[in-house]
Amino acid sequence: MNISPAQTIKRNAIAQWLGLALGLIALGALLVFNLYREFAGAATREQDRLAAQARVISDNMEFQLASANRALESVARELRASGSPSRLQTVTLHLKSFASTMSGVASINVLDAKGRIVASNRPESIGTNLSRRDYFQMIKQRPNAGMLYVSPPFKTILGVFAINITKMISGPRGEFEGVVSATLDPDYFKTLMASVLYAPDMWVSVAHGDGQLFLMIPEREHVQGMNLQQPGSFFTRHQNSGKEAEVLTGTVYATKEVRMMALHTVHPVSLKMDKSLVVAVSRDLDTIFQFRRRDAVTQAALFGLIATVSILGLYIFQRGQLRFERQTIEAAAALQQSAERLQLATDASGIGVWDYDLAENRLVWDDSMYALYGIDRASVSSSYDVWYNSVLPEDRPALDAALHATLYERAPYMPSFRIRRGDSGLRYIQARARIYYDAAGKPVRLVGTNEDITERKALQDKLEVQANQDYLTGLFNRRHFLEQGQVEFARMLRYGESLSVFMLDVDRFKGINDTYGHKTGDIVLQKLSEVLRQTLRTFDIIGRFGGEEFAVLLPETDAQKAHEVAERLREITARTDVALEGGLLLRFTVSIGVATLKDKTTTLDMLLNQADKALYRAKEGGRNKVCVAD
């Protein structure tokens, strides 16, 4: 059967429209898939960052609770050995010593069986009757000498909203004879919570296990003491899950905001606590995805432009097939105009388009590609040579591997690489491409885009540094110190090398803050960080654990050498001047605990714990001392 030219043109037109539709569907699907991956990746990265910050606060709170628990147990044992609390008011001096060495504790009180304060680090509180306090009545009615009681938030006799942790004092036959109670310092935890804020829309909160909100930074009006244990609230969902840590999204009960929130329950196995604390670190959900939404709008607009231009071009092209030569020429001019519009669109978007003919090994660039590489189109004869020679040599193997995987394994072509551009130095490029096959299934062509992602990469690198560094001193934060320390610790064990650790603490740091202000306290911590960098070796690992506490890991260092280094560090610190306003000079000292790896069964946590106990002995021994773990 003969087919007329009109029928042939009609069939070709239908095939062309079907091809264009499939192409646009594929391109749209690729854009949607990429956007989905970018949104999912952004959500995952933000979840990890929030969870890491919540863990930092939780670890510090666990450390403070453990330290306070040891102090309370020490006082309780002393009182059991000495007799009734009412006859042991001289223990006040001992309580002052404990309170001054524990930055997270505001006050420590001893109450007799009638609820009267008989000893305190604050002498003005002695004689006050606190028998009506819930934390006193709770222990009196349900006494348990081994339990660490965590009270709900309440207003102290000093008018401060706080939480108490309490231990029972038992008599010779285990009877109730009173309590020893420590009030957690809200200002310390506010400083700790503020230290993890890396974005303006963040806030951090701590709640009691029964649901009462204890602290929120930045502070909000009318939320302190709010009961969060409500149906559907983040707090209730987290408690019902039974998980130690998780990240949730939704509407916050306390503030009615839509946020992403990382929650972490503080309830260490080593402490027998009657109630837990819950740390929450959150960000505004709209702010997290703000940049991604802008990308989505930009890409959607670009896709709409490409679709519009493509449809218009095909329509004009097909109409040209039905007209005479004059009309064909007019249609060609219209197509040229459409191509120019498409070029303008790609120029404006900062994305270069390229076409790689595999059979002829020929690479064709549009004008945006030459602009992306900072090259005058008229000055080069081969865009392939420009592309390959602009890439850093160390990145070429990965590019070759990506092309091989795309051609022979049908993997997506999405490599990233670096180029040298004369006007702006080193640039990061993200490439994406679609492969085309002939009727036999052989790859014949790659059509793709190159995008300059230098600024985006710099922002990602900056965020990664912020996640690993302590904001005040520039040293490793606790999490990153432990990560790097575990790597170095494993290496020392593998090769049988010696290894030592320091735990050091600024002496009387609370007094510096109280006397000169927190700004001076920050300067002291920065000055100590500078002394650590200058005194220790470049491969020693230094981290700030929180507050005025620092840790150091010294590879290939035995006990004798570690002691010598610690003494030298202590002496240099004691001679270091801190310049204050008005020309005043301040000097400070540190106490250092030293521990050295002696047994292959010892872990890094165990070694740090040994050093921490040695540090505690140095503090008890008068400060400005170095003590070596047994």
Image: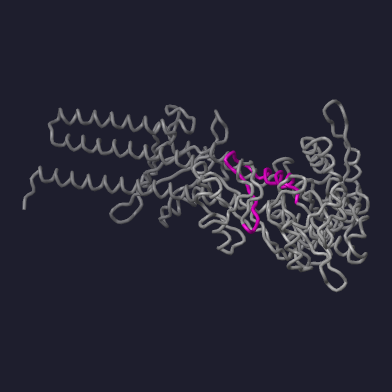
- Residue 595 vertical placement versus 368 (above, below): below
The figure's colour scheme reads: one colour
Q: Residue at x 24, y 28 (%)?
A: 333
**Quadrant in the picture for the C terminus:** bottom right
| Number of numbered tags placed on the structure image | 0
Query: Is 323 covered by the magenta stretch?
Result: no
Given residues 238 and 612, the one toward you in this image is 238
Instruction: Name the residue at the left extreme.
Output: 1
Given residues 19 and 441, the one toward you in this image is 19
Residue 536, percent across and down?
A: 82, 46
Query: Is 193 covered by the magenta stretch?
Result: yes
Residue 254, percent across and down?
A: 56, 48
Q: Residue at x 23, y 38 (%)?
A: 314
Q: Which residues are magenta?
A: 184-210
Given residues 529 and 311, the one toward you in this image is 529
Q: Is residue 299 visible?
A: yes
381 with respect to 74 (left or right): left
Residue 2, percent across and down?
A: 6, 50
179 with respect to 381 (left or right): right
- Residue 69 vertical placement versus 222 (above, below): below
Q: Is residue 611 visible?
A: no
595 with respect to 324 (left or right): right
Given residues 114 and 16, the one toward you in this image is 114
Residue 496, percent across and down?
A: 80, 63
Instruction: Name the residue at the top extreme.
Output: 582
Residue 115 location, quadrant: bottom right
